[in-house]
Amino acid sequence: MSSSDALLQALLTLNRVQAQELLAAARAEHSALEVIELLIRPALEQLGQLWEGGDCALSQIYMSGRICEELLEELFGEISETDPSESEAAEPRLAIAVLEDYHLLGKQIVRTVLRAAGYRVRDYGRQDVETLVELVRSDGIEVLLVSTLMLPAALRVRALVERLRAVAPDVRIVVGGAPYRFDDQLWREVGADAVGLSAGEILAILERLEVKP
Amino acid sequence: MTHQSPTSLPMDPPVAPMTSMERVLTALGQREPDRVPLFLFPVMQGARELGLSIEEYFARPEHVAEGQWRLRAKFGHDCLYNFHYAAIEIEAWGGTTLFRADGPPNAGAPIVRDPEDIQRLSVPRIEDSPSLQRVLEATRLMAGQARGEAPIVAVVMSPFSLPVMQLGFERYLILMHERRDLFEHLMQLNERFCVDWANAQVEAGAHAICYFDPVSSATITSRELFLATGREVARRTIAQFKAPAAMHFASGRILPRVADLFDTGTAVIGVSSHEDLGELKRAAQGRLSLLGNLNGIAMRHWTPEQADVAVRTAIRKAGRGGGFILADNHGEIPWQVPDTVLMAIAQAVARWGRYPLADDQDD
């Protein structure tokens, strides 16, 4: 069993101790970024695929992400301390928000996956269209991730996209959430650039968009 | 050549159609009624019928009763649905509801911010909640109109799923995994509330309780966690209902754990469009009836032909032998679905849902 498979098993059973041991063992041989790339990222991507196939539950994804996030705080600390190239100015400007909705879990899971994979992401929390457009514009965001649970909120993404195209045409917008899973054309209908059907997909999407940690 | 059922042949004596109540009870008895029952759940569309905003519509029980009555007259479906919105239960617990013009109301800020506060929660009394009293009055009005001809379906949030609104989803998942003592205490409170609320609706005239429990779906919780928590909660709670129950998972997957539901006391399960009706029917083994599974999100854009195909496919997969009620997969038709689609669904049921099923005769 590879180390990332072992980590996956530890995460599925929410075995924090085992996950910690695996990361510590990997850290003894690799840099923090390599640990993320070799272990954590594949495990989280696989978790997303399992959920997509109905083979693991959202509660496992969330709690796994939480474990990873906690264990990685130390690693991330090391990265910023030892690698001056990791300055904020050099990072991709990535933000995540929930649009006009009060269900924040999806956003939290995606944020956790991103953090665990080495991305820094601005968390705007819950926002309406106007405030979100202003935040994206003033912060110079390059990729905006938008999470929705309810259909009306998913449809409001169209207004968000139209407003953003007018003031910040280069911003790419990635959507996710239940409505998009039940209508595979909905993301196109609202004008998004991409859709993530599970949290793990966000890493592949960012790779396609050539956004690196 | 068109399909003709034997009952429509000129030599047969005329057969009186069943009432909706007879149709539904026959189907739930795992027998074939005159046609597949149709449960449309146009929760908010009554507002459109009455020319009101969604908030105005839910403000008065007369509106809801009249709206549901008109919708049933229009589409000919087989139940009246007293559901207002999920957050109405949270209002009874001291929470708030946020209305919007184009969709279901949402619960406001969680009422429990610090999990320790769970120890200080007390169970609200149904009679003290003006919001719940409105639902009861709407139910009484529906019962007076329907006079037993059509079942009145009432709704409760399951004690296991209500905390998503009480605490917020994230805080609830952490509680479930890391503070089992507080979780169990919350379940005790919620179970008492849920039973009181369900039985008050039965007393007001409801014939069945739809027990909404998305957190028990395979989408949200692992089987191990479900067996230790959600299933036990369902078993304890449903046993105290004074009417039959349908467990509904609000589009969540349930196929891998259908057999785990046999002893929960539920008679029906609401199933997702993400799962195959034929496989669900086999898994139910005639011990549970199926309710579902038309895709409410996708049906916004359906043509009449697409509605016809979707209905025919569902009936072909799950209709044989009864034990099946056609419905959407979420327990609520989105506001954005046009009436023409709902009409096309109703017409397709009339066309393809007549027993013996036309597709059976093709076999």
Image (spheres, grey):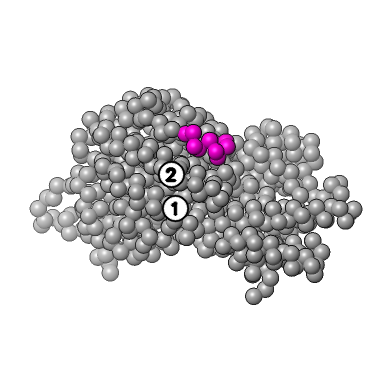
What's the residue type where badge 1 is placed? Thr
Give the residues in magenta. Answer: B112-121
Quarter of the picture containing the C terminus of chain B is bottom left
- Horizontal arrangement in the rendering, residue A84 relative to residue A64 (left or right): right
Image coordinates for residue B73, horizontal then vertical, percent: 29, 36
Callout 1: few (<14), some (14-19), or many (20+) C-alpha neighbours within 10 Å? Answer: some
Q: Which residue is mark 2?
A: B187
* Circle number at residue A77: none
User: Which chain's residue wears label 2?
Assistant: B
What's the residue type where badge 2 is placed? Met
Which residue is nearer to you in this view: B313 or B131? B131
x 20%, y 38%: residue: B148
Q: Earlier in the sequence, mark 1 or mark 2?
A: 2
x 77%, y 65%: residue: A27
Quarter of the picture containing the N terminus of chain B is bottom left
x 43%, y 51%: residue: B230
Callout 2: few (<14), some (14-19), or many (20+) C-alpha neighbours within 10 Å? Answer: many
Reply above or below: B266 against A160.
below
Quarter of the view holding residue A130: top right
The Cα atoms of the two marked residues, 1 and 2, are separated by 9 Å
* Circle number at residue B229: 1
Main SS of the magenta part reads helix
